[in-house]
Image: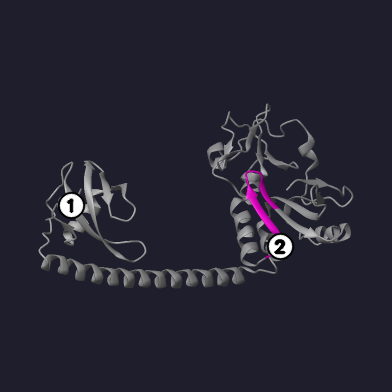
Amino acid sequence: MKLEPIDKEGAALLMPQDEKARRRSNTAPSGKPGITAEELAQGVTLEQLQALPVPVLAYQTQITIHGQFPPVSPLCAGYKLLTRNANGSLGVRYAGIDAGKKKLIQRAMRLASSTWAALLDSRGLTLQKHVASLQEGREAIAAIPSGIYGGAGVWRCVMSGRLYVVVNVGAIRAADLWNVIGYFAASMTAEGLQRKEAEIEAERLEREAKAKAERMERAAKSQEILETLREKLVTEGAETLPETFIPSKGDVFRVLFMRFDGRPALVTYTLAKRGALLCIVRDGEKGRKVEEHHFSAWKKAAKEGRIFAPVAIPA
């Protein structure tokens, strides 16, 4: 969906931007940053950066750590988010900051069935919401709690003409995190999120337990049917092959198994090659086709007495 900004007057910068950040000089050219590029590459929080022993200043698209950094890889959290400036300072784009908080916001919004949509990608966290008018969009922006480093504005979809409030979340102060979550996630609280996730986990475990019980029941019924047929074949004189028997190329044998549709089948195979068990199938319904089976499946079938001695293929 292609969007275009339409309201410069109502656009808001949701961050305390330091005027010093506009300067090109390094305010601590000989300072030790107190953090390594390797640590930054794992992702950091806003609080970790603010606790460093050097000036940490905010731009609109990144936070700059002053001090002297050696040459570094641009990768941070898997993306190219680090930039070493010529003066030795290091810029960290907001997508590399507060990843855990952003994921928490996204998760809370999803579980709360929020009217806001969240997109988390290499550019960071973007929140958007459809509004009926420009005034409604401005009011939504004005109500956003403090604590977000980012920006917000009203945008229009080029194709449909619909209006959206778009919020770019760069970083979030930890002290304001749940106020922010409550606004975007329908008043969700930490306790409410924990309770909702516990309910979802309990439902998942219940579904898995039910599915497992149903699979075991089907397997037991299938085994019972196959065993009845196996005994019938043995009674009629069919010879089962031992587990130790390994077929050679050209050998013909029959395998008793259960089809995917729950019907038992006795299929005649010819071994085409050794290694993977590549067979030519003659089941009388669809002619010949090629299948590949691992020898573990062969051994399991042989152990259960479902592989019968070679027989001649009728012309």
Q: Is residue 212 above or below residue 134?
A: below
Q: Please name whichever residue, 166 or 240, is drawn nearer the observer in this view of the structure.
A: 240
Q: Is residue 21 above or below residue 314?
A: above
Whole-percent x, y for residue 183 in the image = 73, 64
Q: Is residue 296 above or below residue 229?
A: above
If you read the primary sequence from the N terminus, does the residue marked by circle 1 or circle 2 appear first? Answer: 2
Whole-percent x, y for residue 146 in the image = 76, 58
Question: Mainly helix, strand or loop, the magenta region?
Answer: strand
**What is the quadrant of residue 23 in the picture?**
top right
Q: Is residue 111 left or right of residue 246?
A: right
In percent of the image, x 53 and y 73: which residue is there? Answer: 199
Rounded to the nearest angstrom, the CA distance separating label 1 from label 2 is: 65 Å
Numbered disc in front, either 1 or 2: 1
Whole-percent x, y for residue 77 in the image = 56, 43
- Check if residue 7 falls in the magenta segment: no
In percent of the image, x 87 and y 47: which residue is there? Answer: 8
Q: Please name whichever residue, 165 or 3, is drawn nearer the observer in this view of the structure.
A: 3
Residue 253 is marked as: 1
| Other residues around mark 1 within 10 Å, as few (<14) / some (14–19) / many (≥20) | many
In percent of the image, x 11 and y 68: which residue is there? Answer: 235
Residue 80 is marked as: none
Assign a secondary structure to mark 1: strand
Q: Please name whichever residue, 183 or 251, is drawn nearer the observer in this view of the structure.
A: 251
Residue numbers of the magenta segment: 114-126
| Other residues around mark 2 within 10 Å, as few (<14) / some (14–19) / many (≥20) | many
Hey, what amino acid is under mark 1? Answer: Phe
Q: Is residue 192 left or right of residue 264?
A: right
Q: Is residue 195 above or below residue 74?
A: below
Instruction: Look at mark 2 in the image and give the residue it sits on.
Output: 184
